[in-house]
Image: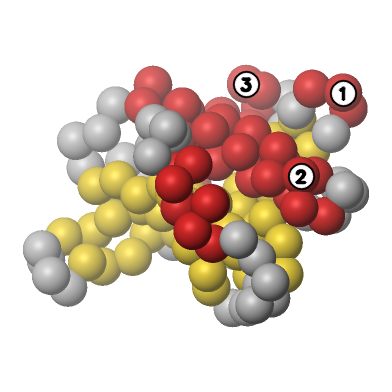
């Protein structure tokens, strides 16, 4: 999969906004219901354990702080199709991961949409605002 080309095409398809950084990082601002938007970063990373390239789709939810009910969030993530909660760079984030090769475009689109929708929902639930 050519991630940059895919992200540009999908952004156009959904009426989003595309930004590219290099050949391994792209961002789509995904339009959501009620005039809301959520940024999703697509990045290619080498998985050292399995020696293959993976694509991660991430979106910030909220700043991490010790008062977050992480156990509750982890339990809720069992209901998600592709996404999971992670903490990275002092942010609670949504992330979906797949192999760069062999994953259908339909599945990748579903991953991006799920990451965007869940990040937006939990961002609002935890902060009461549309920040990211």
Which tag is nearer the camera, tag 3 or tag 1?
1
Q: Is residue 44 left or right of residue 125?
A: left
In this rendering, would 32 be left or right of 108? right
Q: Which residue is mark 1?
A: 34
Residue hosting label 3: 13
Residue 91 position, x and y percent, is 64, 70
The image quarter containing residue 51 is: bottom left
Q: Residue at x 45, y 52 (%)?
A: 74
Quarter of the C terminus within the rendering: bottom right
Badge 1: few (under 14), some or many (20 or more) residues near its Cα, within 10 Å? Answer: few
| Circle 1: element type | helix
Label tally: 3
Q: Is residue 27 visible?
A: no
Q: Which mark is residue 92?
A: none
The answer to whether residue 81 is seen in the rendering is yes
Q: Earlier in the sequence, mark 3 or mark 2?
A: 3
Mark 2 secondary-structure assignment: helix
The residue tagged 2 is 125
Q: Position of residue 24 (x, y in %)?
A: 44, 61
Residue 56, image quadrant: bottom left
The span from disc 1 to disc 2 (Cα, nearest Å) is 15 Å
Badge 3 or badge 1: first in the primary sequence: 3
Quarter of the figure with the N terminus: top left
Q: CA distance from mark 3 to mark 2?
A: 28 Å
Instruction: Note whether 54 is above or below 14 in the view shown.
Output: below
Which residue occupies 39% across, 21% down?
A: 106
Which residue sits at x=79%, y=22%? 33
């Amino acid at each position: 999969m050519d991630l940059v080309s895919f992200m540009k095409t999908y952004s156009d398809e959904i009426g989003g906004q595309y930004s590219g950084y290099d050949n391994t990082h792209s961002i789509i601002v995904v339009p959501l219901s009620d005039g809301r938007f959520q940024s999703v970063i697509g990045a290619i990373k080498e998985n050292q354990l399995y020696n293959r390239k993976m694509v991660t789709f991430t979106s910030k939810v909220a700043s991490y702080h010790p008062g977050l009910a992480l156990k509750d969030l982890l339990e809720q993530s069992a209901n998600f199709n592709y996404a999971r909660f992670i903490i990275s760079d002092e942010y609670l984030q949504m992330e979906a991961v797949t192999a760069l090769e062999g994953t259908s475009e339909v599945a990748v689109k579903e991953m991006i949409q799920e990451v965007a929708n869940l990040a937006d929902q939990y961002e609002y639930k935890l902060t009461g605002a549309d920040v990211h």
